[in-house]
Image (cartoon, rainbow, N blue to C red):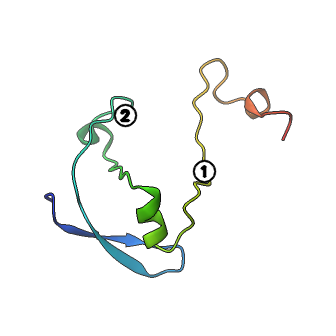
Amino acid sequence: MNIGDAISIPKANGTTQQIKISGTVHDPALAPAWQEQPVYGYITPATLAMLGEGETLNILKVIVSDEPYNVTAIEINGE
């Protein structure tokens, strides 16, 4: 794939939407794709809205170094 190519993004309603690749990014927090094999995409809130989703992000992933597999230890206020 190259910058300017279109990719199909699956949407929550089961349809797909084509968007163009506008650039590349280096995320030092992630292993190189050739090592772990996933591909990550970064989009703006405007692109998220264009895909028919709300502009508000609804997933927050947190890395916990002390006890990464202890859900109780990382929950906020027991919620």
Dividing the picture into quadrants, the one containing residue 16 is bottom left
Q: Is residue 1 above or below residue 42?
A: below
At mark 2, the secondary structure is loop
Residue 10 versus residue 69: which sits nearer the camera?
Answer: 10
At mark 1, the secondary structure is loop
Dividing the picture into quadrants, the one containing residue 58 is bottom right
Query: Residue 39's spot in the image, x, y percent?
Result: 32, 50
- Amino acid type at image mark 1: Ile
- Amino acid type at image mark 2: Leu
- The extreme right residue here reads 78
| CA neighbours of label 2 inside 10 A, class few (<14), some (14 to 19), many (20+) | few
Query: Residue 54's spot in the image, x, y percent?
Result: 57, 66
Image quadrant occupied by the C terminus: top right
Q: Is residue 14 left or right of residue 9?
A: right
Which is nearer the N-term, disc 1 or disc 2? 2
- Mark 1 vs mark 2: give the one in front: 1
Q: Are marks 1 and 2 in contact (CB under 8 Å)?
A: no
| CA neighbours of label 1 inside 10 A, class few (<14), some (14 to 19), many (20+) | few
Residue 7 versus residue 37: which sits nearer the camera?
Answer: 7
Query: Residue 46's spot in the image, x, y percent?
Result: 44, 62
Query: Residue 13's spot in the image, x, y percent?
Result: 54, 80
Residue 36 versus residue 5: which sits nearer the camera?
Answer: 5
**Which residue: 33% across, 35% down?**
27
Q: Is residue 41 left or right of residue 22?
A: right
- Circle 1 residue: 59
- Circle 2 residue: 30
Which numbered dot is residue 8? none
